[in-house]
Image (cartoon, helix red, strand yellow):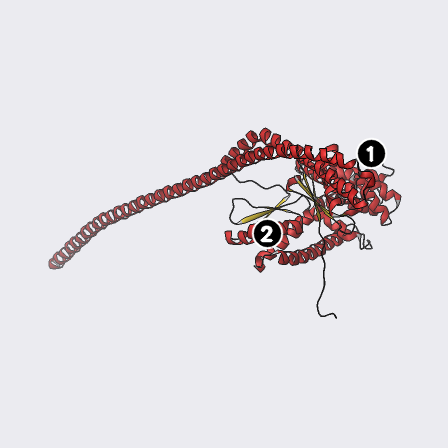
Amino acid sequence: MTWLIVLLAITTLGGAAAAGYFMQALAKERTSFKSQSQDKVKEVAKQLLQNKYKEADEEAQQLRNQAKQFYDRLKSQFQAQQSALEAKEKLLEEQRKHVADKEVSLVKKDEEVAETRKDLMVKLEKIAGMSKEEVQKVYMKEFEASLVSYKAKKISDIEKEIKLTAEDQARELIVDAMQSVATEYVDEITVSTIEIGNEEIKGKIIGKEGRNIRAFEKITGVDVIIDESPTSIGLSSYDGVRREIARMALERLIKDGRIHPIAIEEHYAKAKKDVIQELEKTGKMMAEKANWFDMPVELIPIIGRLKYRRSKGQNMVEHTLEVMEIAEYIARELKADVNMVLRAALLHDIGKVLTTKVKKPHHHISGDVARKYGLDEMTVNAIEAHHEDIEPKSVEAVIMKIADAASGARSGARKENVEDYVERIENLEKTAYEVAGDAAEEVFAVRAGRELRVMVKPSQISDEAAMVLAQNIAKKIDETGVFPGIVNVVVVRELRAHASSGNS
């Protein structure tokens, strides 16, 4: 029994010793693992910190490179603008010199004119015995003398204008150069910009000694703006339809690659046909909006012209549709004639696309168009009465006036300066049509109104009469003051003969 107790005690002590050894080893292992984990965390943290320092350094270097590139680009743009400014100043100086040379030439011309007049007076004493042809010759000589005097006055006016505007032009050029470095601006709505790719295409468009660009301007009736940009060209005209046809024709010429006067005429004819189709498409869409499904066919493309016309900066299609919506809503609320106000709203500004050849306020022209195509007098009154000089005779007329005013008065809808410019250009063309009468085939005001091209019918006017017509139009512009500054009037009388072989 005693040995059994002793054996049990020894076993108990051994188990306790073994357990103590195991716990001591476990604590030691735990301490070692904890030490290794801390070292590994420190190593990872150190590696992350090094990576962040490296990334920050690379990002800082990238920012420095971007800043340098931005500075170089700004410097390059400023230098380009400065070069352009110097070139324009040089051109201005050349213009001054040219005017001075003209003055010297005019002094000599005056002396020649005086001598010619003296001789002419002697010859006129014998005029009673002259034939019809001899009288015409004498008249033409007298006319040429008066033309020289008129040109002398115009050259003097040009010189005065250059002197008055030289300082302002120089200041504007400097301001433009500074602003273009940091900002962009949007062209006036009278200019369309076309991307051309490179300088080589621009050279083709200009043509040898400017032949192609002159032909393009003559055929399309728009100004081609060639500036410092190597990849774009501007087309300027107050007439949106004319400008859109020119844009389409030029884009197709560029794509075709053949750029010469005959190709210009071909692409212009195709572009004109496509634009007319677009006018008809727009006209039909607007007629459907007005529930006018039996609209006269002739009226559809006229309404479509509103797409390419703006009034005080507001697109006329958008304005017309907006007036239609406002007028329709008010008419339904007041139980008025909805169809009447829709048709009146559709046609109320149609006169604005026809004002060039008719010397009337646009709303009077709109009323005349409505009468021509069979609308009743109450609808005509609703159209004409949206301006103050005609009294509204119905609720529908009052609704039309309110709707038009609401659309035009909307914040940001209109820009007065553009409308004033377009009105001056239209008045300029009206003056030419008024003086030329039936002899005028087409009239184009280009160069922002500084040049007026009058295409006349060769069957109705001779070369000599064309000279007289140009002077009469110029005098009329001076007398009426329809356009400020100098306007060069160019009367073009072109006679073309066509024949085909193989018909004998």
| Residue 441 seen in the current view | no
- At label 2, the amino acid type is Arg
Q: Is residue 245 left or right of residue 298?
A: left
Q: Is residue 471 left or right of residue 26?
A: right
Q: Which residue is mark 2?
A: 211
* Rendered image quadrant of residue 112: top right
Spot occupied by residue 169 in the image (x, y as percentages of width and height): 56, 33
Residue under the image location 58 percent in, 60 percent down = 256
Q: Earlier in the sequence, mark 2 or mark 1?
A: 2
Spot occupied by residue 398 in the image (x, y as percentages of width and height): 82, 37
Q: Secondary structure at mark 1?
A: loop
Spot occupied by residue 25 in the image (x, y as percentages of width and height): 18, 52
* Rendered image quadrant of residue 389: top right
Q: Secondary structure at mark 2?
A: helix
In the rendered image, which quarter contains the C terminus? bottom right
For discs 2 and 1, the disc positioned in front in the rendered view = 2
Q: CA distance from mark 2 to mark 1?
A: 49 Å
| Residue 127 seen in the current view | yes
Q: Which residue is mark 1?
A: 389
- Between 289 and 164, the one nearer to me in the picture: 164
Residue under the image location 67 percent in, 36 percent down = 151
- At label 1, the amino acid type is Asp
For mark 1, does the 10 Å Cα neighbourhood hold few (<14), some (14 to 19), or many (20 or more) residues? few
* Rendered image quadrant of residue 394: top right
